[in-house]
Image: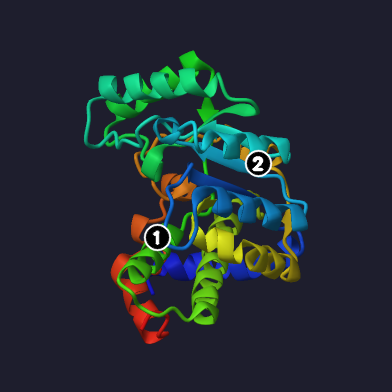
Amino acid sequence: MTHNSQALLLIVLFLLPFVANTQQIAITFDDVPTHDTPLFRHAERAAKIREHLAAYKVSSAFFVITGSVTEQNASQLLAYTKAGHVLANHSHSHLSPSRISAATYIRDLNKADSVMKSLPGAESWYRYPFLNEGPTREKRDSIRQALNVLGLSNGYVTVDNYDWFINGELVSALRNGKKIDYDRLRKVYIDHIINSILFYDSIGVAVLGRSPRHVLLLHENDLAALYLGDLLKTLRSKGWSFVSPAEAYRDEISDIVPDVLFNGQGRLGAIAYSKGIPARELVQASEDEDYLRKLLAEARVFY
C-alpha cells in the first residue's frame, strides 16, 4: 500500500462514523435499448427491469443510444416513461472521442439530440460513451461547448463497474452451450456491484468529507433483468436509500468540473485525481477483464 493510499484509508476510517446511514444512490442504465440474447428478448428484459424497480419504488434513468432505437423496441422506451422513469442521451452511435475527430463526434451528438427530442420523458442529460470526455483538452472542451449549445448537462456517474463484462461472459456461455450456476452468478454480480459502490463511496468520503448522492452505472442487460431486485434488496439492507437521478444530480458535486483528462472513472474519480490522488488508486481491481474472468472461473459459474 502506498503512502497516499494509507492516508486515504485513515481519512475514511476517521470520517465513517459521521457519514453512517446517510448513503443515497440513484440507479441508472446505459446502452438502451439492448439486443435480444439467448436468455431474453429485449421486451422481456425491459419488463423484468421495470418490475424490479417498481417493487422497490425506484425512479431511474435510461440512457439511450438513439441509433439502436427501432419500431420494434421503441415501445419499451415508452413503457419506461409510463412507469415513471426518464430517458436521456447516450449518443447516436456510441463512439469514442479517442478514435474519431471532435467534429465527427459532435455530428453524432447532434443526431442523437434530434432523436431524443422526439421521445417522451427525455431529460437534458448526456452520458459520454465509455465515460470518455476526450483525450485532449482541446477535444474535451470542444465537446463540452457542443453540449452547452444543445442545453445538455453531463449525466455523470459516481460508481463505475464492469457489469457489462460479466454479462458478456454470461451471453457467451449461453451461446456456447455451457451450463450456468445462476446462484453463483448472482453472488458474483451482487458482490461486484456492492464492492464498487463501497469503493467509490470511500473515495467520496476521503475527498469530500461526506458520502455524496451517488449515481450508479448499470446496463440494460440480462444480469439486471435477473438480479436487480436482489441488488436493491441488498443495498436497502445495508442502509442505503434510493433517490431519483434528478435528486442525485442536485448534489454539490454536479457543479464541480475538474480540469482533468482523467474522467473515465466518473465524477468522484475526476475530483479525487484533481486533488492529487494517483489514477492507479482510483480504479478498483475488479475493473479488469482478466480479474473477472479468473473470478468467474474460480467460482465455477460456467461449466
Q: Which residue corresponds to mark 2?
A: 245
Direction from residue 107 to residue 100 in the image, left or right: left
Question: Quick one: label 2, few (<14), some, or many (20+) residues within 10 Å?
Answer: many
Which residue occupies 68% across, 39% down? 85
Which residue occupies 54% across, 77% down? 187
| Separation of residues labelled 2 and 1 (CA atoms) | 23 Å
Would you say residue 214 is visible in this rendering? no
Looking at marks 2 and 1 on the same chain, the residue that comes earlier in the sequence is marked by 2
Which residue occupies 74% across, 52% down? 54
Would you place residue 211 above or below residue 11 in this image? above
Along the line of sight, the residue nearer the viewer: 301 or 73 = 73
Which residue occupies 77% across, 63% down? 21
Q: Which residue corresponds to mark 1?
A: 283
Quadrant where the N terminus is found in the figure = bottom left
Q: Position of residue 40 (x, y in %)?
A: 50, 58
Which image quadrant for residue 3? bottom left
Which image quadrant for residue 15? bottom right
Nearer to us of marks 2 and 1 is 2
